[in-house]
């Protein structure tokens, strides 16, 4: 089952960059745990493919429950894009949708209200460039995270 971050209310803001094909780099700020850097393999879909996006959640809530639920989330996040789009489903209204799998095989999904995200303008791109370069350089040098084993998950195969 995907971690949905308290129906996305524990997602404050962030930026994700897909201007380099095959790679999504950025930072998302979560309730209780703060900023988490991202380095994902894959691409955005649709109108945001090849773009830098920024977002701010108008429904953000910082509460104690978030710390208990998100406390073991990998930080930084490395893994694979599943679907990241502003129009993820033909039968639903367009809205920002961010879904990925971590290298430890955890499944994450963020759905924000329509209008909560946008493609960054040239000024935002320039303002974020140093942060994006630092994140990409630091996380690209990390070895892949070890996948979870049955022992890690508490499943002893009874």
Image (cartoon, rainbow, N blue to C red):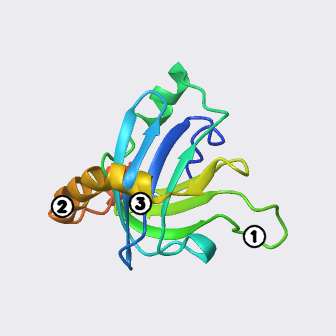
- The location of residue 155, given as percent across then percent down, is 41, 53
Residue at 39% across, 57% down: 125
**Residue 158 appears in view:** no
Mark linked to residue 89: 1
* Above-or-below relation of 113 to 64: below
State if disc 2 and disc 1 touch (CB < 8 Å): no
* Above-or-below relation of 17 to 124: below
Depth check, mark 3 against mark 2: the one in front is 2
Residue at 55% across, 21% down: 63
Mark linked to residue 44: none
**Residue 115 appears in view:** yes
State if disc 2 and disc 3 touch (CB < 8 Å): no
Q: Is residue 130 left or right of residue 20?
A: left
Q: Quadrant of the N terminus?
A: bottom right
- Please tell me whether mark 3 sits on a helix, a strand or a loop: loop
Mark linked to residue 137: 2
Q: Residues within 10 Å of mark 3 (few under 14, many from 20)?
A: few
Q: Is residue 152 left or right of residue 157?
A: left
- Please tell me whether mark 1 sits on a helix, a strand or a loop: loop
- Please tell me whether mark 2 sits on a helix, a strand or a loop: helix
Earlier residue among tags 3 and 2: 2
Earlier residue among tags 1 and 2: 1
Mark linked to residue 157: 3
């Amino acid at each position: 089952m995907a971690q949905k971050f308290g129906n996305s209310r524990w997602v404050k803001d962030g930026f994700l960059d897909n201007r380099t094909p095959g790679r999504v780099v950025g930072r998302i700020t979560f309730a209780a745990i703060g900023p988490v850097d991202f380095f994902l393999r894959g691409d955005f879909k649709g109108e945001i493919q090849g773009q830098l996006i920024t977002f701010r959640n108008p429904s953000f809530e910082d509460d104690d429950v978030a710390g208990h639920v998100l406390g073991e989330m990998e930080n930084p996040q490395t893994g694979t894009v599943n679907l990241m789009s502003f129009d993820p489903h033909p039968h639903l209204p367009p809205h920002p949708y961010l879904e990925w799998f971590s290298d430890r095989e955890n499944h994450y999904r963020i759905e924000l209200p329509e209008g909560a995200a946008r493609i960054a303008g040239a000024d935002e791109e320039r303002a974020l460039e140093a942060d994006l370069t630092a994140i990409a350089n630091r996380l690209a040098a990390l070895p892949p995270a070890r996948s979870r084993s049955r022992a890690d998950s508490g499943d002893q195969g009874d």
